[in-house]
Amino acid sequence: MPNVTLVIDGQTVTVPAGTNIVDAARIAGIAIPVFCYHPKLKPVGMCRMCLVEVWTPKIDPATRQAVIGEDGRPVMTLMMGKLQPGCVTSVSDGMEVRTTTDRVRFAQKGQLEFLLTSHPLDCPVCDKGGECPLQNLTMQFGPSTSRFDYADKIHFEKPIRLGDLIYLDRERCILCSRCVRFQDDIAGDPVLGFDNRGRTWEIISKSDPPFDSKFSGNTTDICPVGALTTADFRFKARVWELRPTPSICPHCPVGCNISLDMRYDRLMRVMPRENDYVNEIWICDKGRFGMRFIESPERLRQPLIRKGDTLTPATWDEAIALIAEKLIAIRTHAGAAALGGLASPDLPNEDLYLFQKLFRQVLRSPNLDFCTGAPGEPAIIDLGATLGVGKGTNLSNLGAGTSVLVVGADPEEEAPLYVLRLRGIAARGGDLTIINPYPTKLDRTPARVIRPRAGAEAFVALALLKTLIEEELIAADFVTRRVQGFDELKMRLRNHSVASLCDAAGAPEDVVRSAAYAFAKADNGIIIYGRVALASGADLIDALADLALLTGHVGRPNNGVIPLIPGANARGALDMGVHPGAGKKRGLTAREMWAAAREGRLRGMIIAGMDPVRDNPAAAEALDALEFLVVQDIFLTETAQHADVVLPTASIAGREGTLTNAERRVQRFRQARIPEFNTPAGWDVAQRIARALIALGVKPTAPDGQGDGRGASRTLAKTAATTASSDQWDYAVAGDVADEIAATVHGYADTTYESLGLTRKPQWGRQPNEAIFYDGTSYENTEGVGVQIAAEADNPKATFTLRARVPPLFATNDAYPYTLLAAPRAYDGRAWSRDSKLLPRMVTPHLILNADDATALGIAPGGLVQIASEVGCAVLPAQIDRNLPRGLALMPDVDGAPLSRVQTGPLTRIAIMAHISETVGTR
Amino acid sequence: MSLIEKYGAEIESILARYPQKRSAVLPLLFIAQDEYGYLTDAAMREVADLLDMPPTDVFEVAGFYSLLYTQPVGRWVLQVCDDVPCAFCGAEDLIATLQEKLGIPVDQTTPDGMFTLQRVKCLADCDHAPVLQANLEYYHDLTTPEKVEAVLAELRQRAESGEKLSISGRYADR
Ligand code: SF4
Ligand code: SF4
Ligand code: FES
Ligand code: FES
């Protein structure tokens, strides 16, 4: 867009045409006060706080030329003879804006006097007090007295619940509609609205449950007054008493930047920190309200040692000594291969790194995994290390010219912030294709929706590939230079037409073709895949890789693949080498470990931060067959109850570390408080065990596997880490571990805490001191925005081989006519939800069925259904969804869901029947 | 019986008038209001469902317009304009008369469920001030208690005659 030059308060500013006056002034460092306008929202001109004088050159209607006055300068006229709202008035050439004249000051004063006519002025008991734009602007621009009758203020019942998380104080609301617009435009959950008119105008929410949105907390940030407050923070603290600690949300692969706002050692609230690369200024409710587990009274406080049937408290020395002794004993009589370790993909890099180092170098066992080995758990197939989005990717800049394929994923449940990011891309003109066997909330975004049969997603990807080939949409130059096996791929697809592949997928051919066209023609192409894609397996994911390769959408910023692998730090677990394929010698997978334990081949295990028994009660039997089990966790989980030694660790608040997000951005979180109950960080637990082993004479070996991070890579020969790492085990602080990670782990060279600290950025779009927009909204990012690690494809010399092939169709089975899929749920009721205000929203186990299927089976909503597969059966309440495809049944993967009883794999053939006539309530 | 079961044809023909379903929200609310007597919570959700609209949006519409009632009303809703021109021509007297004759204050319904009395702003009929609107029908120049009495009698008689009344004006022949 062409630029426009104008003058604001005597300063000459040049901005893109179409910019509004408030934004133009911000660029010049001039703050025009606003209430309804927010830089992340479209302007609506509702509050009139931004009134300014706008002077434009007078135009002679006859000549259409500016009229020149006697002084030789253009004659200026006041636009429409009155003040104009700056937020909805676009700049034009030669314009002159005055924001500090008497007329403007008079208007601002009057505007505030009006706004305050109905305002209760209860700042002393208002949670917003201290970070309230209304307070601040009144101090700066408002009148000192009011001419309105104080007794005539309108009164409403003091806060009412807008939902179970958010309270509304209608007296304080200035009706700016920021909250409504956030929900409609940014979150895509249109659950807020205005009721009535005039003085009884008020915000309402009539969704079921009320204010049904996973992003509701953000409205309390952008509300410019204390009208919206959270159930979580109400009356907890005055904001100026808080000590904000930069942190990273540990709940999903997005890695939102957050602030843990502490008063002394207590967590008062969680707020977003600005990071345009990751979460802009937003976080989801799981991140905001799901952090109370930190202070749960059920936290483990001290080590426990099994004495007969009970776990009894012990000292750290006793526990570590016992662990060292037992592990050595097992290694001596059964060999190192009889030891195995599972570590949660939620743990920070430092913990995961030392965990695998303990196993690979000290215990010399390659049996490491971050999976739980439950029967329905899909294999983790990672394209992030090889074809991940290029270094420098920033989704918040993308729009027109970008095409995104979201394949087999439900971002709202798996990585909520991606809903906002993807909606943003669509709103800025980007092209979105959603390929998923069942409807998700992302479908509300303007997008092409392709609904393949469950398990047949690969055929859509193949149809896209075939379209690329047929319509010559290949990035020929890229393919020649960096891709191998194109002719072979063409051969493999030779006997298949786009139509036949679409047919196999149950997808409309024209939509598939237009998706292929849009993706190939876009400047930037991104593929996001998630849990359902993993369930579909390698046939799909290999085809997705080929899509990215044939279109050349890899190896550049804003191009590539974003895998949503379950866990906040699955990326880190892969990179650190906590998986069986990372070393020279292949180890056992979690599932193989369970079998090995039952057969007596695996004798001792350490399980860190993971609760496999919860997902898979059958694992309990395997654990009980072990000679020795160590569980390290913050709670006494079901798994921990089977342990011989239980070790408590610090939560994310009690230590520091780094997490690597889905886009391979390594981000540091800071320690917010002294460790709860003096518990150590996970990395220190590994260190204590290693030291004890070494003290008993165990000799560490050379590194193998750690830092490979490419164990799951399909295209590169396995190269074990070559750099030597310290075998001293003398890490004093997390930064020491991070230094070693930087020195040894492939790609992590720039991730020492020093270099992460250097990534501080001037705030995006935020000028210094912009309280007017950002007060109470989000914190400036003072900790740095993190470092994105290059993908293999970022190396211009790396070449890749095409792998796509046409798989057999997923076999049908007349005895088991339905397909069961586990559906991820953000509100899964697991350990993080303890003491959370979100508890009422936790999803309870149920089965979701198509309406016609339910009718045919005689199942009413809430009625009980019995499901049976080849391996087992279960009874649970039914929920009916008229939009679910026939033949598909979804079981939300939540606490207590009997998935592992029936699943034979990620996709399971089941039979469904009504279970007696009894009904129970479902949500 | 649900609206779609009872008024399927009427609803279909309304929907056919608009390129977007949600544009039909007002006519559908009128049907719901006539059917249920006023817009109950459930009625608004039913309309939202018919139009694939978020329920909140339907409640917003109902809250905005003074001809959509979210509280129970009588068979005749009497709306008296109390805006400036009508006020000059005796609107307050008219309201006082109505209150007296009906025996109810503003915003209440007579115990027999016949009349609801409301104040509204300009009804765009200022040249005949003071103005009374009864279910979308205008009554002008109600400057004496006798005239008011006559109108009330007429309205009562029409209701009792079995005439099909609509608080939404759906059956008004104009
Ligand atoms: S609740 Fe807050 S954000 Fe919403 S309209 Fe009122 S003042 Fe604005
Ligand atoms: S989107 Fe993910 S990382 Fe961000 S706040 Fe929510 S759970 Fe946390
Ligand atoms: S009218 Fe411009 S900020 Fe509200
Ligand atoms: S003022 Fe009463 S009708 Fe206009």
Image: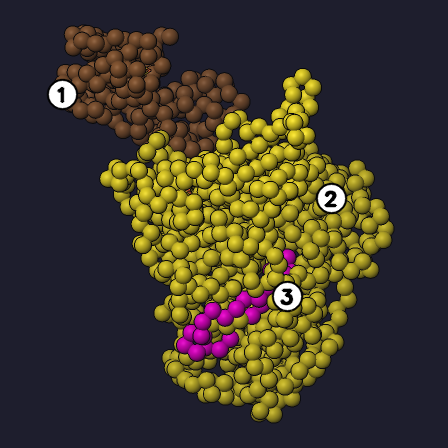
**Residue A310 vs residue A740, the one in the foreground:** A740
Discs 2, 3 touching: Cβ within 8 Å? no
Which is in the foreground here, disc 1 or disc 3?
A: 3
Residue at (43, 85) in percent of width and height: A315
Label number found at residue A758? 3
Q: Position of residue A774 (x, y in %)?
A: 49, 51
Q: Nearer the viewer, residue A788 or A769?
A: A769
Q: Chain of mark 1?
A: B
- Write down the colour of chain A: yellow
Question: What is the span of residues highlighted in magenta in the rendered image?
Answer: A657-681
Q: Which mark is residue A523?
A: 2
**Colouring scheme, one of rainbow, by chain, secondary structure, one colour:** by chain
Left or right, residue B166 beside residue A336 = left
Ligand 2 within 8 A of label 2's CB?
Answer: no
**Up-down: is A2 above or below A675?**
above
Q: Position of residue B69 (x, y in %)?
A: 31, 26
- What is the number of the mark on residue B103? 1
